[in-house]
Image: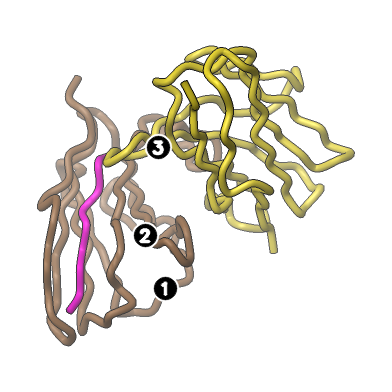
Chain colours: A yellow, B brown
Amino acid sequence: AQSVTQLDSQVPVFEEAPVELRCNYSSSVSVYLFWYVQYPNQGLQLLLKYLSGSTLVKGINGFEAEFNKSQTSFHLRKPSVHISDTAEYFCAVSDLRSNYQLIWGAGTKLIIKP
Amino acid sequence: KAGVTQTPRYLIKTRGQQVTLSCSPISGHRSVSWYQQTPGQGLQFLFEYFSETQRNKGNFPGRFSGRQFSNSRSEMNVSTLELGDSALYLCASSGTGAFSTDTQYFGPGTRLTVL
C-alpha cells in the first residue's frame, strides 16, 4: 500500500531564509502528488500539484516542488520565507492502487523565527 | 464565490450518542469528500460523494456513514460514538469530478469532542 513520509515534524527557520520541506512516498508506480497548507484553525489549501509533465512545479505564495521519480520524493521549497508562512504543510499522494484516494503525510510544522 | 462551509464548528457529545455533521460545497461543485484529522492518525479519507452517489470509501467502520443531496450538500453521520472518534472532521469539495486529479477545496472543519 502507498505510504507518505514527511521526514521532519517541525522545521524552524529564520525569516527571509530558504526552506525545504521533505516528502517521500513508497510506491514508484504512476502517482499524483500534492502539497497542501493548513493555517491555524483553518482548513487545508492547495499549494501545488504534480500530475504529469515538467518535474518542477510552481505553486502559490512563491512555493515550488520537484518530482524525483528515482528517489520517490516530492520536496517543497521556498527561497525566502515570511512570518505569514507559519503553518503546517501536508504532502499527499494518490495512485491507482489506493483507488486515487489521497494518502497523507503526517505534516510538517514550519516555524518562522523573526 | 463562497467557500466550503461546515456546521457546526464545534460539537461535544458523550460516548454512545450519534452525531450528524453538515457540509455545503462551493457552488457548482458536485464532489464532496470527508476526512478525519487526529494528532495520532493524521489525515484519513472517509468517503467521497459525487452526484448523490458514494464513489469512494476509506477504511472506516460502518458507524461512519454519509449522504449527499441533490443540491450537493452532504452530511456525515457517526453512530455509537467512541472516545477515539474525537477529531477534526474536514469536508472538501471539487468541481470537475475527476477524483484522481482535482484540487480539493477544504472547509474549516467541525471539531468533535467525545466525552
Q: Residues within 10 Å of mark 1 (few under 14, many from 20)?
A: few
Q: Chain of mark 2?
A: B
Q: Residue at x 52, y 18 (%)?
A: A15
Kindly indicate whether the residues beneath marks 2 and 3 are on one polypeptide chain: no
Give the chain of mark 1. B
Helix, strand or loop at label 3? It is strand
Q: Nearer the viewer, residue B89 or A27?
A: B89
Residue that carries the numbered disc 1 in the rendered image: B60
Return the x and y of residue B67 as percentages of the image width and height. Answer: 23, 60
Residue placed under numbered mark 3 in the picture? A38
Dots 1 and 3 on the same chain: no
- At label 3, the amino acid type is Gln
| Magenta stretch, residue numbers | B107-115
Q: Quadrant of residue A17?
A: top right
- Farthest residue, direction right: A70
The kind of residue tagged 2 is Gln
Say which element carries label 2: strand
Q: CA distance from mark 2 to mark 3?
A: 14 Å
> Which mark is drawn over residue B36?
2
